[in-house]
Amino acid sequence: MRVLITAPFSESGLKRLRDEGLEIDYRSWLETGKLHMGDSLLKTLRDGEYDIVIVEGDEIKEPVLEQTRIKLVGSVRGSPNNISLNAATAKGIPVIAVPGRNTVAVAELAIALMLSQARKVNAAERLLKDDFFVNDFKDFAGMYTKLTGFELNGRTVGIIGLGNIGFEVAKRLVSFGVKLLVFDPYVAKERIRAVGAKSVSLDTLLGESDIVTVHCAPTDETQGMLGAREFNLMKKTAIFINTARASVTDEDALLNALKAGAIAGAGLDVFSMEPVDCDNAFLELDNVTVMPHMGSNTVETIERQSKIIVENIVAFVRGKRPKNILNPEVYD
């Protein structure tokens, strides 16, 4: 079987597939700089006569599935929206994914953003790079006062969404000695108790938290959930962290809240306009830590996603049902 892989993949994963007798064509988008949208991958798949395709952001829509010989589609994401699952199911094509591949990576980045904002790391670096000189101790005292931060210990952190990532964030925050509030209408009470948290309404969480961190899924229900009203409920000293999706917030309302001092700062890894570059409006603010949507960008994430995809492909080629299949009904 011929396999096209456009997602980042580990060398050990590629070797394992080749050892299984598969012919591998590895074209990671990180190396090619190409992202295939619509049916732009159709010609490549047809010309290469591939049986299996593994992607990250490339779209595998109905025309691609209808007009190729693909027998298995895989995504290194947990819940891929770039693959037409219904079309694949209609053709009897299994679709595999990688749940939890970046859970630890995103959770750790969320903690890093909290610490960066609490200790004003971003503001300190900008100040020192902006022709700052200490001519006497008055200059140093002014800088020291301006950059006074706060410790997480004893503070209240509100977590919106206690799914896999939110839960990992909560587990790590326990060691900082914080009080945890959770807003998640669908989470089990046992899960909240496991991290010593308290379930509260969204308004209560926003009003009482020193740090608010977002970890809910992008759904119709969460679309624009946090707007001007919600940011005005937060403490003026509060920090807002978002490593989930920009769609959860009214981005203009967030920008205005930061400019007006309605909240103290933010750590952001997701935006309505991506990829992020130097035109991002939040970069103009010294009280915001801006990341270019790289929460999952770790060596371990690539190793993890490669290992899981390989296990699923090997099961498939051996005639077994893959473990991480999104449409198990194709085997019924």
Image (cartoon, helix red, strand yellow):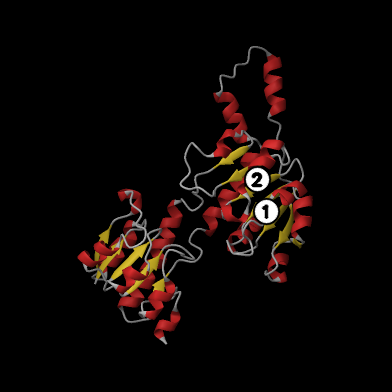
8, 287: nearer the viewer: 287
- Circle on res. 254: 2
Instruction: Indicate which disc, 1 or 2, sits on the residue closer to the N terminus.
Output: 1
**Amino acid type, residue under disc 1 in the picture:** Leu
Q: Secondary structure at mark 2?
A: helix
Residue at 70%, 67% (x, y): give it. 185
Q: Say whether marks 1 and 2 touch (CB < 8 Å).
A: yes
Q: Nearer the viewer, residue 155 or 232?
A: 232
Determine crowd level at label 1: few under 14, some 14-19, many 20+ residues with C-alpha closer than 10 A. Answer: some
Q: Which mark is residue 226?
A: 1
Q: Can I make out residue 118 in this image?
A: no
How many badges with numbers are in the image?
2
| As drawn, 204 above or below 232 | below
User: Looking at the picture, how far across and down is residue 171, in whole percent?
Assistant: 65, 58
- Residue at the top extreme, as displayed: 135
Disc 2 marks which amino acid?
Leu
